[in-house]
Image (cartoon, coloured by chain):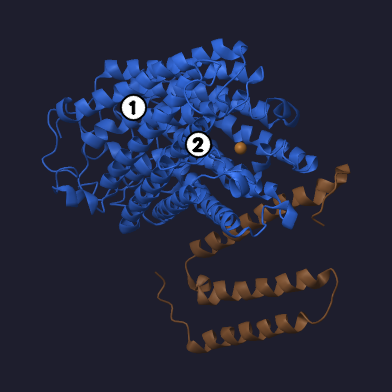
């Protein structure tokens, strides 16, 4: 395959027409359908973020009514968390790449995969409809007793949308697990799997084991709201804090549904642009599983200032610290991979460096918040808001964009402008820090979250943050332009534009419908850059 | 997936066992075992659920992956219950009233 032209037939042009897309069973096309879906919900969530930042430019609540403001930040949170951050990397990049990376023709259950997308779109449309027609003012966390006994907004309708969407995640998780167990090409042993696949395997475990609990929690919430069963009502022997237990049992691990796939992307990008095997491959692989399992044992750190027992709080605090270990293993191993690698700075790698910076800040401030005593001081302040934006938004979206840029030439067969790519990565990095770093300071000084008016002393920090959000928004908009442009007018990328190692780079760009011309047989470890250099007779890069 | 054919006799035996256990549950409800009341009831329910999962849901006959998936979901349920109860059981220790026990 010469680099001058695209292959004559590939998955994008094999069949034509809207029906061939809406009824497709090709995991690659379904990945692209998901890309449209998550981009749409990201735009909606971003729009509502802009409204929040506009209101907070001045200390007085002068743009929106308090009730409207509550609905705005709730809509922002629900759209971003459930319909963008959770599905973004697994459903788009995971869907597209997992079968190719393990040398399979498709996922184990292609029809189920398509069904997942429809469930996701129906759930999203349902939530969006109820959020726009009246809205919800509980925050994305739906805390009782406000959500069950006091709020006069569309709690059940919105919850139903999230409930429906949950099944999409469960089905995708099951699909990935079965695919990784059963569909690996000959020679693709577990420890030859790219770390991208390990990360998604761990993510799938969380989705399958955690999401049902969220579904049950929403059902209980609806039943309580409709029939006043008393599950969360102390007057009837119930307990509002029980809701928080159930909610965070899913929603803390949900953060790892966002971050593990992000880490999975970063492992691939760093190996490719350092031209080295990931340092401590086994440790990084097991760190994913470790994070997935430990992630289920720490949810009480969201409840230090509820009436949760301080003894339980202490245990949750200690367990939370333990999550830092596998996370740090990954960060240090990526850094060690760079050591004496032949590092180059193409767009995906610039994004990977942005990820490392943002994740380090987000992760370390997580240790602050996991500390029981300190959390009492900064709980429900902008410190928390800044922390989870660094982890969930800074890290996940940066990795998502990095991954999208890394595999874009594989997905569409054409290259984007490297100049604009690097520029947008740098704009995102500066915009992100300008938006969210001031929020750490404001929060530490006592600015509470979810308020539309605030004392004047916080104004400078809020103006900085709102100003930064314009830069950040710009950083997210630039790629839309040059990436779309590249689909039609970009230079043909060739099969392996980065000179990277991995089965996805051994097929054409874009790949054929069945992914490979002939079923691949795997004979090497993942990331065997040094061995390849030796085989080619060149001096090893180290 | 698994094409294992289970003899009807096995289904009938399991069904019989479920009926017997249901009767036991009802009979036991007429006696007061103190603290053990809940333990006995939940124990019988657990045995019944296990029978349903193993035989009616064919978990016994599937590949190795299926028991692992089922086993880990039970383990995860236990994690949820254990840590939540760790909160409820220790809330009263600081002297703050706990109406739960
Ligand atoms: Cu958490």
Please say if A155 is above or below A357: below
In the rendered image, residue A213, in percent from the top left (x then y), is placed at 56, 53
In the rendered image, residue B88, in percent from the top left (x then y), is placed at 77, 51
- Front disc: 2 or 1: 2
Q: Nearer the viewer, residue B11 or A235?
A: A235
Is the CB of the residue bearing disc 1 within 8 angstroms of ligand 1? no
Residue at 54% x, 56% y: name it.
Answer: A219
- Chain for disc number 1: A
Please say if B9 is above or below A132: below
Question: Which shade of the palette goes to chain A?
Answer: blue
- Whether residue B12 is visible, yes or no, is yes
For the residues marked 2 and 1, what is the alpha-carbon distance in whole angstroms? 53 Å
Left or right position of B40 against A175? right
Task: Identify the chain drawn in brown.
Answer: B
The disc label shown at residue A533, or none: 1
The disc label shown at residue A437, or none: none
The N terminus of chain B sits in image quarter: bottom left
The C terminus of chain B sits in image quarter: bottom right
- Quadrant containing ligand 1 reads top right
Residue at 36% x, 32% y: name it.
Answer: A43
Is the CB of the residue bearing disc 2 within 8 angstroms of ligand 1? no
Q: Secondary structure at mark 1?
A: helix
Q: Secondary structure at mark 2?
A: helix
Residue at 57% x, 32% y: name it.
Answer: A327
Residue pointed to by mark 2: A74
Q: Residue pushed farthest right?
A: B95
């Amino acid at each position: 395959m010469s680099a001058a032209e695209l292959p004559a037939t590939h998955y994008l042009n094999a069949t034509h027409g809207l029906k061939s897309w809406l009824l497709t069973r090709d995991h690659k096309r379904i990945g692209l359908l998901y890309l449209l879906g998550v981009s749409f919900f990201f735009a909606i969530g971003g729009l509502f973020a802009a409204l929040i930042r506009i209101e907070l430019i001045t200390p007085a609540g002068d743009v929106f009514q308090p009730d409207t403001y509550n609905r705005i930040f709730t809509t922002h949170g629900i759209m971003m968390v459930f319909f963008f951050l959770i599905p973004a990397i697994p459903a788009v990049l995971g869907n597209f790449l997992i079968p190719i990376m393990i040398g399979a023709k498709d996922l184990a259950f292609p029809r189920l995969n398509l069904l997942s997308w429809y469930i996701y779109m129906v759930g999203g449309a349902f939530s969006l409809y109820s959020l726009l027609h009246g809205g919800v003012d509980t925050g994305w966390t739906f805390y009782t007793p406000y959500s069950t006994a006091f709020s006069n907004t569309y709690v059940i309708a919105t919850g139903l949308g999230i409930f429906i969407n949950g099944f999409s995640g469960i089905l995708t998780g099951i699909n990935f697990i079965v695919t990784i167990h059963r569909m690996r090409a000959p020679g693709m042993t577990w420890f030859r799997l790219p770390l991208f696949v390990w990360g998604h395997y761990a993510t799938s475990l969380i989705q399958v084991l955690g999401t049902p609990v969220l579904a049950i929690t929403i059902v209980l919430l609806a039943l309580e709201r409709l029939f006043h069963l008393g599950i969360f009502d102390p007057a009837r022997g119930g307990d509002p804090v029980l809701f928080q237990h159930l909610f965070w049992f899913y929603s803390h691990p949900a953060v790892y549904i966002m971050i593990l796939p992000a880490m999975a992307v970063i492992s691939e990008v760093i190996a490719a642009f350092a031209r080295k095997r990931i340092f401590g491959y086994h440790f990084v692989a097991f760190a994913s599983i470790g994070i997935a399992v430990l992630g289920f044992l720490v949810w009480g750190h969201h409840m230090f200032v509820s009436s949760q027992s301080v003894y339980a709080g202490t245990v949750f605090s200690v367990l939370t610290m333990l999550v830092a270990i596998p996370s740090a293993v990954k960060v240090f191993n990526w850094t060690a991979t760079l050591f004496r690698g032949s590092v180059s700075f193409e767009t995906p790698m610039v994004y990977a460096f942005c990820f490392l910076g943002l994740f380090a800040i987000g992760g370390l401030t997580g240790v602050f918040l996991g500390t029981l005593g300190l959390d009492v001081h900064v709980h429900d302040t902008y410190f928390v808001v800044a922390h989870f934006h660094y982890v969930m938004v800074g890290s996940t979206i940066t990795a998502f964009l990095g991954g999208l840029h890394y595999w874009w030439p594989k997905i569409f067969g054409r290259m984007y402008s490297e100049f604009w790519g690097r520029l947008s990565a740098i704009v995102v990095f500066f915009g992100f820090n300008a938006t969210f770093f001031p929020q750490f300071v404001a929060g530490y000084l006592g600015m509470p979250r979810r308020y539309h008016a605030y004392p004047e002393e916080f104004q400078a920090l809020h103006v900085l943050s709102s100003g930064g959000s314009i830069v950040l928004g710009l950083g997210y908009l630039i790629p839309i332009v040059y990436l779309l442009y590249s689909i039609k007018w970009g230079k043909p990328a060739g099969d392996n534009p980065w000179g990277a190692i991995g089965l996805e780079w051994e097929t054409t760009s874009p790949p054929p419908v069945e992914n490979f011309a002939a079923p691949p047989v795997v004979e090497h470890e993942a990331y065997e850059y040094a061995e390849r250099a030796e085989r080619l007779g060149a001096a090893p890069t180290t | 997936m698994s094409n294992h054919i289970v003899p009807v006799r096995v289904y009938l035996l399991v069904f019989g066992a479920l009926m017997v256990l249901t009767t036991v549950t009802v009979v036991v409800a007429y006696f007061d075992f103190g603290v053990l009341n809940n333990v006995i009831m939940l124990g019988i329910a657990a045995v019944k659920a296990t029978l349903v999962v193993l035989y009616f849901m064919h978990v016994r006959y599937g590949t190795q992956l299926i028991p692992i998936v089922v086993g880990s979901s039970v383990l995860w349920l236990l994690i949820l219950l254990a840590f939540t109860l760790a909160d409820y059981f220790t809330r009263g220790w600081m002297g703050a009233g706990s109406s739960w026990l």
